[in-house]
Image: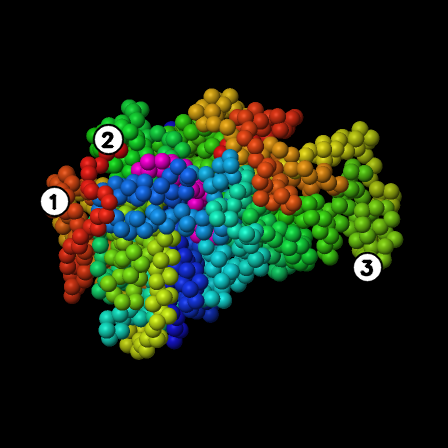
Amino acid sequence: MAETHKPPEQFSFRVRRYDPESGEAPYWDEHTVELEPHRSVLEAILQAKDRFDGSIGIRCSCRQAICGSCGVRVNGEPALACHTHLDAALKGASDGVIEIEPMGNMPVLKDLIVDMDAVHWKKVHRVTPWLIAKQPVPEREYLVPHENMVDVTQTMACIQCGACVSDCLAMEVDPGFIGPAALAKAYRFVGDPRDDQQFERLNDLAQDPQGIFDCTHCFKCVDACPKDVNPMGQIMRLRRIATNDHHIVDQNNGERHEAAITGLIRNYGLLHEAELIPRSYGGNSWFAKFTPAAGKELLSSLPVIVRGLLRGKLNPKIAIFGHKIPKDDLKAVQAIYDKVESREQRFELNLYIAGEDEEQGAQASAPRGETPSGAEASAPRGETPSDSTPPADPSGSDYAEAPGGVENPPSPQDPTGEGEIEAGDAAGSQAQAREPGGDERSAGEGSEQ
Amino acid sequence: MPAHDVLIIGAGLAGQRAALAAAREGASVAIMSKVHPVRSHSVAAAGGINAAISVDDDWHSHAYDTVKGSDFLGDQDAIEVMCSEAPGEVMHLEHMGVTFHRNDRGEMDLRAFGGASMKRTAYVADITGQALLHVLYEQLMKHHETVQRYEEWFTTSLLRDEAGGCCGAIARDVRSGRMEAFTAKNVILACGGAGQVYKPTTNGLIVTGDGIAMAYRAGAPLMDMEMVQYHPTCLVETGILITEGARGEGAHLLNSEGERFMEKSAPNKMELASRDVVSRAEQIEINEGRGVGPGGVGIHLDVTVVPRKRTLEALREIVNLGKDFAGVDITREPITIRPGQHYIMGGVKTDVDGQTPIAGLYAAGEVACVSVHGGNRLGANSLLDTLIFGRRSGEHAAARAASMAMPEVDANAQLRRDADAIDAIINRPRDGRRVSEIKNELGELMNAKAAVFRDEQGLQGALETIARLKEEADSAWIDDRGTVFNQDVLGAIELSYMIDCAETTVVGAIERKESRGAQFRTDFPERNDEQWLKHIDITLDGDRPKVSYSPVTITQWQPEERKY
């Protein structure tokens, strides 16, 4: 059994201390504790508190990664102290001493305790974080498809620990950025078919210069999240629904910028940098550079362009004519576009909707498999494939173990999803039929009731 | 001095629900918690919430299951209130935004749970408590203009007026160390149970019996404190909870011989008998040498019989818990568990509107004993309890506030007394024991002597030890001399709260000379309705607990033998 645990060992850690009353600068405080290697960093801190120094400040309660209190940085990386094993932490320690610091991007109040109200909760409040329910309110529950509820469960699973906020690079540069946690919270309503304000919410977050288009795709929040909420993925979904479904053209050029990138790559196989700015400002065509907005932006970028040319970072030929890749490669890139765009619905990553090839057979014969798989919404959503593909869906190799995806929530025209539910066959076969040629992740995806 | 119609202490599900209900009635409301509301321990409730919402169901059936689960110690009038109002409450939560999982018709899906005669448990994967708590907090953010939040304020005592009624509380701002007196027409205690009295426990480190002890010290009676629930499936080392939802989805319990031993004690319901029954059955297997794992102190919970895809979707949290906290992939192999302290059925005695016998003092949720759980709580009835009686307390307190003037309170003396007490703890000489040592000894003592099986000798010994620990706690010292986030000094106060809870638990357990629900006395192994079909009330008399009795309310269901 995997449960045969190793005996206790000594672990040393140093914790960043700060006493606001002392008038002194922060300092390091080192302790050595004895615990089994699979025990958590939080248990190490608590043992030190119990035995050596009760004044070490850390918020904590549940010890099981559900209350979200003990967000810290372990060896420079954001984590829940209770969710980080000592042996793993030791591996990441450069000098054999585990380093524990308060989270970033938030003011430190004492030791490992940061002011989440001033940053995190203020931003959560910014996204109108409550359901604005469709009227009239039904006597019983709203009838909504199962997979929509499972879908928003991924963002509902956010424990507000602040780990993603701690490491958000965009927020480091622009402290006003609404940020990963709050935007993931926004998806929880945007993806909820009971909410009446999908367009308003998205328009609000798209037009805000510090909203959904302020994210720089750095994946830091995805790595940081201890609950697999995938905040950046949720932000990308907000963008896709805002642009592809609601056609919101924002004042931040976010929508045009995305269209420009995907359009250019479709045409050239690689990004044509010189075309990017004009198209981001003037619209997705070669003539964009002649629009006043693009001209203005190009003019203001001239010094950068000139410096780039002088330092050899820009090749004039490529700048004017774009990159060339072999024809077959270009065809292959375009085939990807065609395939993705020919799908009747977008596939979105969702960790609550799980599917594994291997046990499909076993499952079908299991007692549960006998009941129709219910909320399997196999009906196409009737959405027209969009002109531009969504930005890279984070379902590449980083997510090799991630289980299946979920289709896009119902279109805004039929937000309750009523009438879309069909009693289906057993989950496995249906999912296969729905995703011909899909990769192994998508086989068996979709959900039982 | 801040003054409110309704001051709620504790911001878990009961407290937040009370705040929303009182605000809706137009009262001026404040909600105070020693932690940020979403850190409250309600967040850890996993499996779901019971309500007879299915068209085939009837709240009477839910009520009967609850009465039976309580081993007939629950007050049936209160159980009727809870179960009949459950469907409306759950629908209200759904309308508020809780993302309940659905069935193939798009209606709320229901899962099986222990002690229930049919599928009756609405759920959000296995993070139901978290989903409920976060949705209620969304509502508090929405109603921020009508509900004042005091987040990270630690309550040190309740204020009482000359007539003996409750008129506010003294609290310390954890961030700054500032002490403040709060006047209130009504105070609702909603600060949870006392799990930290036990070690290990499924409960968070913040669950230290604050409300129970404060009410007890203010003169309110505590009821059925001996009724302590051991949850059948907790990780062996840490006590971390594996949701009953796992068994609800079909998981088996196996002893070292691979037997589904529940056949012996609950041939019909098997793993889904009520928690006291399952925990006892497990403990018998362990005691008789059929345990598994190191030292044979565990039992196997086999989730592999649940279809893997279903497990990954509906039990995702415990898949992760197994991986992260026990190194086990529960979809592939059994996980070793054992019974662990989880919940206290007892608490501050209240009526169905949350009123304690002290005017102006209410209690709701785990801190309270209405009693809907009697000798044993059914799984997924605790979330329901917090919400129903949280709401009812809030509404009742708001109505009461509307007909009275703001009390005029001179709280200075008490404020100074509490502030001085904190200073005294900070300045104690380092010649006694550490607070943490005493807390650990207390927890281990309770887990040894006041657990699944109890007897007179062990309990008497425990009572003596508690008396010694109480004395030692009075001189226990701490390290932190600061005012900003001095968690150390709050820990010392929490220890004193926990000792009061431990003492009353043991006194109740000694008093009840029978076996009923969670109380199993090896020296009195039978239920004795003739003498003990009654509540045990404990009040503080001077500095000693005084025992009295009150009758159990029976409306429709006469006590009968309990079989699963």
Q: Please name which of the two marks, 1 or 3, marks the residue nearer to the observer.
A: 1
Identity, as a three-letter code, of the amino acid under mark 2: Ser
The amino acid at mark 1 is Glu
Tell me what residue is drawn at x 42 percent, y 39 percent: B55
Q: Residue at x 23, y 48 (%)?
A: B555
User: Callout 3: residue from which chain?
Assistant: A
Distance from the alpha carbon under mark 1 to that under mark 2: 24 Å
Residue B33 image offset from top left, x and y in percent: 39, 61
Q: Would residue A128 be found to the left or right of residue B356 on screen? A: right
Percent across and percent down for residue A316 are: 87, 46
| Left or right of A179 in this view: B559 | left
Q: Chain of mark 1?
A: B
| Chain that bears disc 2 | B
Q: Which residue is mark 1?
A: B530
Mark 1 surroundings: few (<14), some (14-19) or many (≥20) residues within 10 A: few
Compared to residue B219, the image places residue A369 above or below, namely above
> Could you tell me which quadrant the C terminus of chain B lies in?
top left
Which contiguous range is marked in magenta? B111-135
Relative horizontal placement of residue A277, taking residue B255 as reference (left or right): right
Disc 3 element: helix
Same chain, marks 3 and 2? no
Quarter of the figure with residue A438: top right
Task: Identify the residue position indicated by label 2 in the image.
Answer: B265
**Residue A443 in the image: x percent, y percent?**
58, 28
How crowded pointer 2 is (Cα within 10 Å; few <14, some 14-19, many 20+) is rated as some
Residue identified by numbered label 3: A300
Q: CA distance from mark 3 to mark 2?
A: 81 Å
Residue at the image position 83 percent from the left and 46 percent from the top: A285
